[in-house]
């Protein structure tokens, strides 16, 4: 236990501290922007980002992953804040946390195994596009100084690592922010800064119980929003965990992450913050800047609060162009460029799932909807593919009186129709043997098809024998099959 704690917290101290500083600086404008999207004071997003990052550092299931206030969650809060106010948002945040903890205990995190690689790729590509699009307002209707500063920032980010010794010591995004801020202050360039985004808080957060009536009416108001926030939050967190797993070649505890996100959101709600979740962009910044352990997440959250409360006058001077450059770097690094070249290599169904996920997410800005559609499409394509692997071979005895049908493959809703069509019901035979040794029946639809086949043969006067059922198929047949129940057969045959 002690060894694991040492590994997760103190195995990469310098890298985690430097990465945490970069993330903290990049979190500030995002937290303010997300607060504005949700229609609340900037301090609600900043307090949420501080609290969620610090709490998740201790209770999360994925070291090195950054959680804070996010745009996907903020979009779901707009109507609640507009119609009922901040207090109801805080109550919804607490309920969101409770739902996520329950999800962790019933192991919903394990459901991520049903999300195919093509859906994850589509999700990542869509997020990269959204991150880039979010920077466009900072690059439209501005002076040439902004473009020059952004280009310089990208130059520093990509060229600094090539410098001997120092290039490998300091994370280039941090160097970009520091250098461009110093240059803007010395040169006195009139350029949009973090201070122009909104007023930074000047006090530490305090314990704040939502001032709402504790009754059924309140629950009915916040429950739909809390369920939506919990689902989107867990979905984005699980996706982020998968991506950081790939980047760091390590494994995360998904169900612990669900509980951790819930605890973090409860903490956020009690400190006057909004609900949040894992952030793919910030997590990638953290990993690319050298962050690997829980210390990086803790430093990011703690420094965020220290900077906005005690170093606000300095933080306000950071040019937005510097942070735009960092986020463009994240966008470029997030996008799976190999997925474009793989369009020629991968099956058409895989490409359709990936592209559809991208289009839905970018078009609706709803990450959950895009993933849901992607998973649905992937499931349909998979069912169709597996359904085609079922075949029925017919053999006849020497005296022509017994016909044996050998069923090979998976029989379920997608292949049940083909299963029925594989039999010749008009053939004059005394006995039909259906050999299920190499078959597996999965659902009620397949059992219904088996009933149909048996009853049709019996109606034609043939004796039917089922042989070779495996234990799982036998269990399903015993439970749901009706071909040996005279009353049910009568109903199935329509009384004839």
Image (cartoon, rainbow, N blue to C red):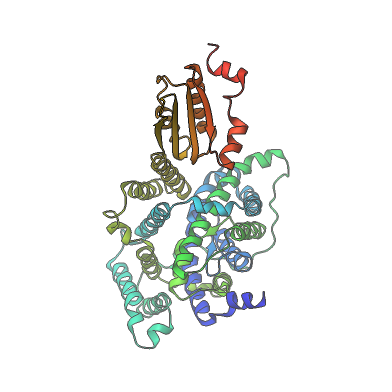
Tell whether 309 sits left or right of 197: right
Q: Of all residues shown, which one is farthest toward the top? A: 496
**Percent of width and height locating residue 446:** 50, 33
Q: Nearer the viewer, residue 101 or 73?
A: 101
Q: Of all residues shown, which one is farthest toward the bottom? A: 165
Name the residue located 60 percent from the left edge and 24 percent from the top edge: 484
Q: In which image quadrant can residue 136 be found?
A: bottom left
Q: Nearer the viewer, residue 281 or 457?
A: 457
Task: Work out whether residue 182 can be spotted.
Answer: yes
Tell whether 280 sits left or right of 346: right
**Percent of width and height locating residue 261:** 60, 58
Tell whether 120 sits left or right of 62: left
Q: Is residue 357 above or below residue 314?
A: above
**Percent of width and height locating residue 273:** 60, 58
**Percent of width and height locating residue 476:** 59, 36
Name the residue located 63 percent from the left edge and 49 percent from the top edge: 92
Q: Is residue 172 above or below residue 301?
A: below
Q: Nearer the viewer, residue 14 or 75?
A: 14
Tell whether 217 sits left or right of 346: right
Task: Work out whether residue 195 can be spotted.
Answer: no
Name the residue located 52 percent from the left edge and 77 percent from the top edge: 16
Q: In which image quadrant can residue 200 be found?
A: bottom right
Location of the N terminus by quadrant is bottom right
């Amino acid at each position: 236990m002690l060894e694991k704690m040492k590994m997760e917290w103190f195995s990469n101290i310098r890298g985690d501290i430097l990465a945490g500083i970069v993330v903290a600086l990049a979190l500030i404008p995002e937290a303010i922007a997300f607060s504005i999207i949700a229609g609340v004071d900037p301090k609600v997003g900043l307090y949420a980002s501080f609290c969620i990052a610090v709490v998740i550092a201790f209770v999360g299931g994925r070291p090195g992953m950054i959680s804070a206030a996010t745009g996907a969650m903020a979009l779901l809060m707009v109507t609640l804040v507009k119609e009922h106010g901040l207090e109801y948002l805080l109550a919804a945040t607490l309920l969101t946390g409770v739902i996520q903890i329950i999800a962790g205990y019933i192991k919903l995190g394990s459901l991520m195994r049903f999300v195919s690689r093509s859906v994850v790729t589509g999700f990542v590509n869509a997020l990269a596009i959204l991150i880039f699009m979010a920077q466009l307002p900072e690059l439209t209707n501005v002076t040439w100084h902004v473009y020059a500063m952004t280009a310089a920032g990208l130059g520093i980010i990509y060229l600094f690592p090539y410098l001997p010794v120092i290039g490998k010591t300091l994370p280039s995004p941090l160097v970009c922010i520091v250098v461009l801020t110093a240059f803007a202050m010395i040169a006195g360039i009139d350029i949009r800064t973090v201070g122009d985004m909104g007023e930074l808080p000047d006090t530490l957060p305090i314990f704040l119980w939502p001032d709402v009536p504790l009754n059924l009416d309140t629950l009915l108001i916040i429950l739909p929003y809390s369920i939506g926030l919990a689902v989107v939050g867990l979905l984005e967190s699980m996706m982020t965990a998968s991506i950081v797993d790939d980047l760091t070649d390590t494994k995360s505890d998904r169900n612990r992450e669900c509980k951790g996100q819930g605890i973090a959101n409860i903490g956020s709600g009690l400190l006057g913050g909004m609900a949040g979740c894992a952030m793919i962009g910030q997590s990638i910044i953290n990993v690319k800047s050298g962050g690997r352990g829980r210390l990086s997440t803790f430093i990011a959250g703690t420094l965020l609060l220290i900077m906005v409360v005690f170093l606000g006058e300095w933080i306000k001077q950071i040019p937005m162009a510097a942070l735009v450059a960092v986020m463009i770097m994240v966008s470029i690094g997030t996008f799976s460029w190999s997925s474009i070249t793989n369009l020629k290599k991968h099956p058409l169904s895989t490409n359709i799932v990936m592209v559809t996920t991208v289009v839905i997410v970018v078009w609706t800005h709803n990450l959950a909807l895009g993933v849901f559609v992607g998973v649905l499409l992937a499931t349909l394509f998979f069912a169709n593919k597996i359904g085609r692997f079922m075949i029925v071979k017919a053999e006849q005895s020497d005296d022509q009186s017994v016909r044996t049908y050998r069923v090979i493959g998976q029989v379920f809703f997608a292949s049940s129709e083909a299963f029925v069509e594989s039999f010749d019901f008009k053939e004059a035979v005394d006995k039909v043997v259906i050999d299920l040794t190499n078959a597996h029946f999965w659902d009620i639809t397949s059992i219904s098809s088996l009933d149909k086949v048996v009853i049709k043969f019996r109606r034609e006067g043939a004796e039917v024998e089922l042989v070779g059922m495996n234990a799982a198929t036998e269990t399903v047949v015993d439970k749901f099959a009706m071909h040996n129940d005279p009353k049910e057969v009568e109903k199935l045959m329509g009384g004839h």
